[in-house]
């Protein structure tokens, strides 16, 4: 549970106002973040997982682009999307910094992974190698999404670079 001492004084009043406003919604009153944003990443991971059986799915994966939290909700049908957008500006820096850092790693991983898979497919690489790389990308993406989910629910810890490097070592 977030206590007043966890939030800098200059962020506290706005946080408290929005924590009350998000009560009863799918937005965390503890962080002012919503897990719905992670659907943006779940979609691309599902597409990536199809590549070993359908290599042409890489073309669909190339269409995926990162979206900011605000862009995602602006384009979504999430019931409380306007509240999610407003509340994001009031997310305490204790959560917002590690959340955004985690998302940057996730976007980099996915974009780099798709580019690498496309190269391998075009080069006619062994299907087994492509499958292993898809698994490595998916595992790393899931670990980063789990980290983002934990932040949404009150953790203030992003993954260390050495942890991320360990996840993608199989690529």
Image (tube, rainbow, N blue to C red):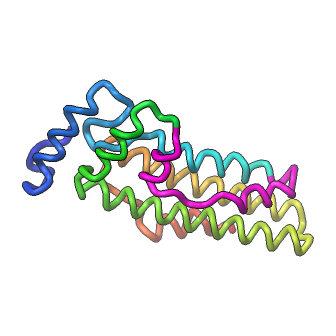
Residue at 38%, 56% in the rendered image? 99
Q: Quadrant of the N terminus?
A: top left
- The residue sitting at 73% across, 49% down in the picture is 47
Q: Look at the image and tell me in which quarter the C terminus lies.
A: bottom right
The image quarter containing residue 121 is: bottom right
Give the total number of marks visible in the rendering: 0
Which residue is rendered at x = 44% and y = 60% of the image? 102
Percent position of residue 140, x then y:
58, 58
50 in relation to 97, above or below:
above
Q: Nearer the viewer, residue 29 or 131?
A: 29
Position of residue 90 relative to residue 84, above or below, is: below
Q: Position of residue 51 (x, y in %)?
A: 81, 54
List x then y, in percent, for residue 52: 83, 54
Q: Nearer the viewer, residue 23 or 161?
A: 23
Percent coordinates x, y for residue 8 in the rendering = 12, 56
Residue 87 placement, left or right of 117: left
Q: Residue at the spot x=46%, y=57% of the render?
A: 68
Q: Which residues are magenta?
A: 51-76
Q: Is residue 137 left or right of residue 72?
A: right
Q: Is 75 inside the magenta-drawn segment?
A: yes
Query: Magenta stretch: residue 60 in it?
Result: yes
Q: Is residue 145 above or below residue 101?
A: above
Picture quadrant where residue 114 is located: bottom right
Q: Residue furthest top?
A: 24
54 horizontally vs 161: left or right: right
Position of 88 compared to 72: left or right? left
């Amino acid at each position: 549970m977030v206590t007043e001492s966890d939030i800098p004084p200059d962020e506290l009043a706005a946080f408290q106002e929005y924590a009350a406003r998000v009560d009863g919604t799918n937005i965390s009153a503890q962080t002012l973040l919503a897990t719905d944003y992670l659907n943006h990443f779940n979609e691309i991971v599902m597409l990536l997982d199809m590549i070993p059986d359908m290599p042409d799915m890489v073309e669909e994966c190339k269409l995926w682009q990162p979206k900011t939290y605000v862009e995602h909700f602006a384009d979504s049908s999430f019931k409380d999307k306007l509240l999610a957008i407003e509340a994001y500006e009031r997310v305490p820096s204790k959560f917002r910094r590690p959340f955004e850092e985690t998302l940057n790693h996730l976007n980099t991983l996915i974009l780099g992974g798709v580019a690498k898979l496309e190269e391998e497919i075009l080069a006619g690489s062994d299907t087994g190698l492509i499958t292993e790389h898809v698994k490595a990308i998916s595992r790393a993406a899931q670990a980063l999404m789990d980290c983002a989910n934990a932040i949404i629910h009150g953790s203030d810890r992003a993954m260390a670079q050495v942890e991320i490097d360990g996840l993608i070592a199989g690529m």
